[in-house]
Amino acid sequence: MNGVELALVVMLGLELKHFVADYLLQTEWMIRGKDSFFKLGGYAHAGVHVAGTAIIFLLLGIPVKVIATLIVAEFVVHYLLDFAKAHYGEDAPVTANPQRYWAYHGLDQLFHHITYIALTYLVVIMTA
């Protein structure tokens, strides 16, 4: 698989994983646990994300050292993005301020997708 093909397959895998982890596997407990470093829900949610990423990368034959490095980075970034959204979005519950809620949600999702672009780039250059 050349670099372009690898990049496309990695991005597709990460986007599918993101949908599953954020919209199908995320529980209310995880959502409520994102606003504090002392609650486990946010950590569990970030853990679901990196578990999915690890599976995708393993299936693609990415070296284990590369996977370990990238999932640690993804875990930290994902957790901190969700923590920030939980704090900055406190003033915008969906029912009270839907426009601001969706703006925060969209910005959060944009940053997660930019993270996937970075991960894809790093996979390609680290496995070339």
Image (tube, grey):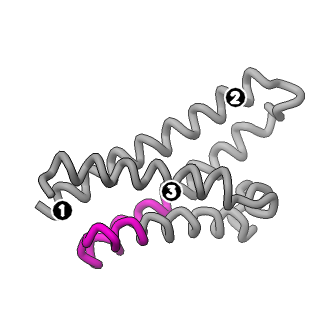
- Decide if residue 93 is on the left or right side of residue 70: right
The Cα–Cα distance between marks 2 and 1, rounded to whole angstroms, is 36 Å
| In-front residue for pair 48/82 | 48
**Residue that badge 3 annotates:** 17
Locate the C terminus and report the quarter of the image it occupies: bottom left
Residue 102, image x and y in percent? Answer: 69, 28
Q: Amino acid at mark 3?
A: Lys
| Tag 1 near tag 3, CB within 8 Å | no
Look at the image and tell me in which quarter the N terminus lies: bottom left
Disc ID at residue 113: none
Whether residue 5 is situated above or below residue 21 in the rendered picture = above
Q: Secondary structure at mark 1?
A: helix
Q: Amino acid at mark 2?
A: Trp
* Label 3 vs label 2, nearer the camera: 3
Q: Is residue 67 magenta?
A: yes
Kindly report which numbered mark, 1 or 3, lies closer to the viewer in this rendering. Answer: 3
Could you tell me which residue is drawn at 58 percent across and 63 percent down? 46
Residue at 63 percent across and 67 percent down: it is 43
Tell me whether the residue at label 2 lies in contact with that at label 1, contact meaning CB atoms closer than 8 angstroms.
no
User: Is there CB contact under 8 Å for labels 3 and 2?
Assistant: no
Q: Quadrant of residue 21?
A: bottom right
**Residue density around tag 1, few if under 14, some if 14–19, many if 20 or more, within 10 Å:** few
User: Is 118 on the left-hand or right-hand side of 94?
Assistant: left
**Residue on which the image places disc 1:** 126
Q: Which residues are magenta?
A: 55-76
Please give the name of the residue rendered at 66% of the width and 43% of the height, measured from the top-left corner: 85
- Vertical placement of 40 versus 15: above or below? below
Q: Residues within 10 Å of mark 3 (few under 14, many from 20)?
A: many
Q: Which residue is mark 2?
A: 102
Up-down relation of residue 83 to residue 49 (above or below)? above
Q: Majority secondary structure of the magenta segment?
A: helix
Q: Amino acid at mark 1?
A: Met
